[in-house]
């Protein structure tokens, strides 16, 4: 990427967005569009209830199933499957990042993980009858591939945007992802609600919806892979030190393939040791762990809170999920523009104030108040996309050059590997108080603690310490 020399008095140097760079950005945006449907249609809406119903049909007289000889209630299956996939991601994602940075084969890795993940998602069409074990296995593999592909995808951001452009590019990608997820979810909901008139059973309709997410994911990944390009690995050698030797700038030759995986392990352990040299980067990861766990928990328990405490119908809850997706498109773009004016850090801090307000408002929501619930869902949508998009771009500034995928591997597991903290506090508070209102309000802790930690971080110093140039506004 060619960078024009700065002109005196012209502000920060910004690389010209030439045709090649525009093409790559389109490819990068299109992957957010491609992958978001897995989260919305598969994980959030359709798979959990459907896999539970399949498990229930296979249960014994006591309502228990016995996968791998382990007895459990049928209703516990999906929770355990999600937990197992997350544990495996914690093991796989950092290694994926190390190999991606070392090999310079990001296009091949993105294509491989997305292909396997999308094929497993398409194969969910065959999860019927009593085949709950097949559904569990397909989801575990698909979710691991989804996380690994996300790590590789995130690592392109520093290559596609200068420090001052990064917030806008990240926000645009996140916004486009929300629209993609919303479009397919709307189509799937239309199919699901009209399945009888189409001559389908409810199970067949769900299986078509699940498979459609895999087809969408695979189809638009082709666009991404065709437009993105590999880059020469930087600064990594077999010992993990920072230098420039050891690789050519072309494709994968035999020597690099032979040493790639072994070198990836060595590089992973070297990165774990080396991260201690960047305590401010680790500080940000700690702050992100806190407030993002709050974000993920609010998303995860909103339907339960709405159903159990507010007595809202399933139609209202599902339509609220769709509303969040649509509003999040505009919110991500809006917060990206605000970040351009006041800086990403300040924008995130104000968004965390908004999240705290959401929980306070949720505490006072009236039972059966559909309009109030939709209003709260709109507020969540508006701040959700910007919070996550700006956190992604902010972290990209804190990564030592050449180690983007490795560090984004740890960024992802700081999200996925600790996602039990918020649900645990929610469940514990409910157990102690028997009130979902107190339980949802308890999540304020994550936004306050994460906000304080982020506010105390000297971001400019952290970026310089990582070897990068700070943007004009932080």
Image: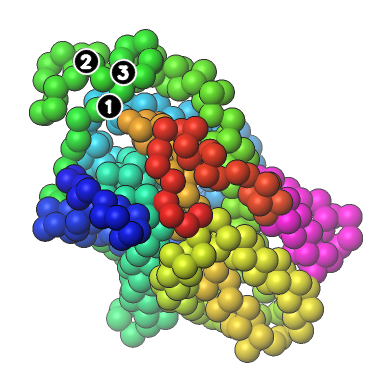
Instruction: Give the dominant element type of the magenta stretch: helix, strand or loop.
Output: helix
Q: What label sits on residue 243 in the rendered view?
A: 3
Return the x and y of residue 435 as percentages of the image width and height: 84, 66
The mark that comes first in sequence, 2 or 1, is 1
Residue located beneath label 2 in the image: 246
Q: Nearer the viewer, residue 257 or 81?
A: 257
Image point (31%, 79%), residue name: 199
- Residue 184 highlighted magenta (yes or no): no
Q: Residue furthest front?
A: 8
Badge 3 crowding class, 10 Å Cα cut-off, few under 14, some 14 to 19, many 20 or more, is: few
> Magenta residues, as a range?
420-449
Is residue 351 in view? yes
The residue sitting at 80% across, 69% down in the picture is 437
Does the magenta run of residues contain 445? yes
Label 3: which secondary element: loop
* Residue 234 numbered tag: 1
Q: Residue furthest right?
A: 433
């Amino acid at each position: 990427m060619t960078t024009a020399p700065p002109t005196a008095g012209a502000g920060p140097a910004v690389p010209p967005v030439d045709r090649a760079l525009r093409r790559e950005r389109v490819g990068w945006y299109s992957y957010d569009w491609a992958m978001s449907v897995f989260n919305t249609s598969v994980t959030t809406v359709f798979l959990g209830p459907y896999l539970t119903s399949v498990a229930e049909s296979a249960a014994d007289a006591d309502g228990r199933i016995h996968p791998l000889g382990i007895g459990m209630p049928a209703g516990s299956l999906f929770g355990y499957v999600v937990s197992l996939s997350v544990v495996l991601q914690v093991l796989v994602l950092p290694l994926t990042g190390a190999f991606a940075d070392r090999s310079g084969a990001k296009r091949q890795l993105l294509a491989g993980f997305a292909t396997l993940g999308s094929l497993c998602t398409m194969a969910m069409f065959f999860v019927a009858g009593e085949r709950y074990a097949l559904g569990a296995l397909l989801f575990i593999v698909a979710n691991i591939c989804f996380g690994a592909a996300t790590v590789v995808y995130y690592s392109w951001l520093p290559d596609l945007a200068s420090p001052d452009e990064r917030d806008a590019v990240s926000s645009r990608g996140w916004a486009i992802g929300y629209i993609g997820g919303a479009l397919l979810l709307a189509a799937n909901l239309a199919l699901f609600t009209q399945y009888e008139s189409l001559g389908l059973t409810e199970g067949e309709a769900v299986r078509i919806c699940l498979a459609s997410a895999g087809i969408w994911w695979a189809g638009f990944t082709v666009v991404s892979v065709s437009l993105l390009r590999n880059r020469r690995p930087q600064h990594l050698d077999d010992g993990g030190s920072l230098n420039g030797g050891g690789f050519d700038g072309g494709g994968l030759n035999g020597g690099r393939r032979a040493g790639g995986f072994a070198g990836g392990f060595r590089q992973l352990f070297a990165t774990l040791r080396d991260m201690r040299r960047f305590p401010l980067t680790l500080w940000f990861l700690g702050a992100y762990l806190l407030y993002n766990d709050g974000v993920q928990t609010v998303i995860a328990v909103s339907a339960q809170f709405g159903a159990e405490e507010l007595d809202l119908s399933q139609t209202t809850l599902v339509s609220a999920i769709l509303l969040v997706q649509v509003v999040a498109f505009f919110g991500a773009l809006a917060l990206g523009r605000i970040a351009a004016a006041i800086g990403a850090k300040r924008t995130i801090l104000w968004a965390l104030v908004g999240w705290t307000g959401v929980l306070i408002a949720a505490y006072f929501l009236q039972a059966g108040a559909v309009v109030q619930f939709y209003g709260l869902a709109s507020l969540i949508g508006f701040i959700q996309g910007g919070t996550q998009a700006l956190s992604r771009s902010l972290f990209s500034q804190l990564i030592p050059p050449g180690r983007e995928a490795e560090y984004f591997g740890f960024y992802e597991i700081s999200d996925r590997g600790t996602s039990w903290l918020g649900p645990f506090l929610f469940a514990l508070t409910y157990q102690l108080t028997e009130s979902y209102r107190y339980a949802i309000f308890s999540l304020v802790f994550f936004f306050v603690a994460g906000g304080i930690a982020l506010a105390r971080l000297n971001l400019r110093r952290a970026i310089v310490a990582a070897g990068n140039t700070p943007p004009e506004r932080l």
